[in-house]
Amino acid sequence: MIEGLLDLASAFGLSTSSGLNAYIPMLIMALLAKFTGLIELGEPWNALTSWWIIGLLAVLLVVEEIADKIPAVDSINDVVQTLVRPTAGAIVFAATTQSSISLHPVLAFGCGIILAGTVHVVKAGSRPAVTALSAGVANPVVSTLEDIVATVTSFVAIIFPYLIVIWLILLIAAIFLVLRWRRQHIRR
């Protein structure tokens, strides 16, 4: 029972961080599953531990990191990532909950898509405002902060899943503040 709840907390954390960057949580999950006992991936998700998949995720992460730091290119990248990030959220949610909870794959995919998709929409929706207000100067800083949050959330979700509940509350508060800030600046 407790293991299932902890895996569910991990799934929530990994899916929400997928909304910021699709490849960070997938790569962290794949590497930790390959080299540690912190996470176990059953069939078919253990394919993520293949060197080919790990290499592909690493290459895609480098491309994402470069594209997300350049003003205007980051907005195009967010459009492309509109399908990728929710899909990554679905994959990590299903992979994390499969063995302990036996959550139906459709429900797991749906949860992952909603969580990652919601975070992605907020991220992609706020980036044009950041670009406009800072003439693009703040984009690399904001992108780096998003990557740090995605990385920390992914590690916390796997290593300390009970802390993810607190982390999600903080993330929801941050999203609320960004939306409130955005509404105030749009009215001006």
Image (spheres, rainbow, N blue to C red):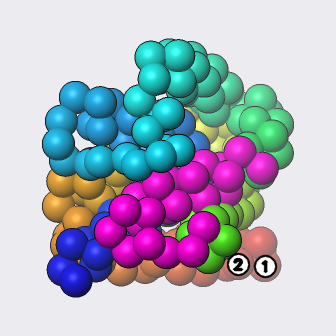
Which quadrant is the C terminus positioned in? bottom right
Residue bearing mark 2: 183
Residue bearing mark 1: 187
Amino acid tagged 1: Arg
Q: Main secondary structure of the magenta part?
A: helix
Tell me the quarter of the picture where residue 99 sits: bottom left
Question: Can residue 144 be seen by looking at this rendering?
Answer: no
**Circles 1 and 2: CB atoms closer than 8 Å:** yes
Whether the magenta-drawn stretch holds residue 89 is answered as: yes
Q: Considering the numbered disc 2 on the image, is that residue within a helix, a strand or a loop?
A: helix
Residue 167, given in percent of the width and then of the height, sits at 30, 70
With respect to residue 151, does 129 lie above or below?
A: below
Residue 75, given in percent of the width and then of the height, sits at 78, 41
Left or right for 95, reference 117: left
Which quadrant is the N terminus positioned in? bottom left
With respect to residue 69, does 142 lie above or below?
A: below
Q: How many neighbours does mark 1 have within 10 angstroms: few (below 14), some (14-19), or many (20 or more)?
A: few
Left or right for 34, reference 139: left
**Residue range (magenta):** 83-105
Question: Can residue 39 be seen by looking at this rendering?
Answer: yes
Whether the magenta-drawn stretch holds residue 110 is answered as: no
Q: What residue appears at the point 18 percent right and 80 percent down from the top-left corner?
A: 2
Front-lying residue, 100 or 178: 100
Left or right for 155, reference 176: left
Left or right for 114, reference 149: right
For marks 1 and 2, give the one nearer the viewer.
Answer: 2
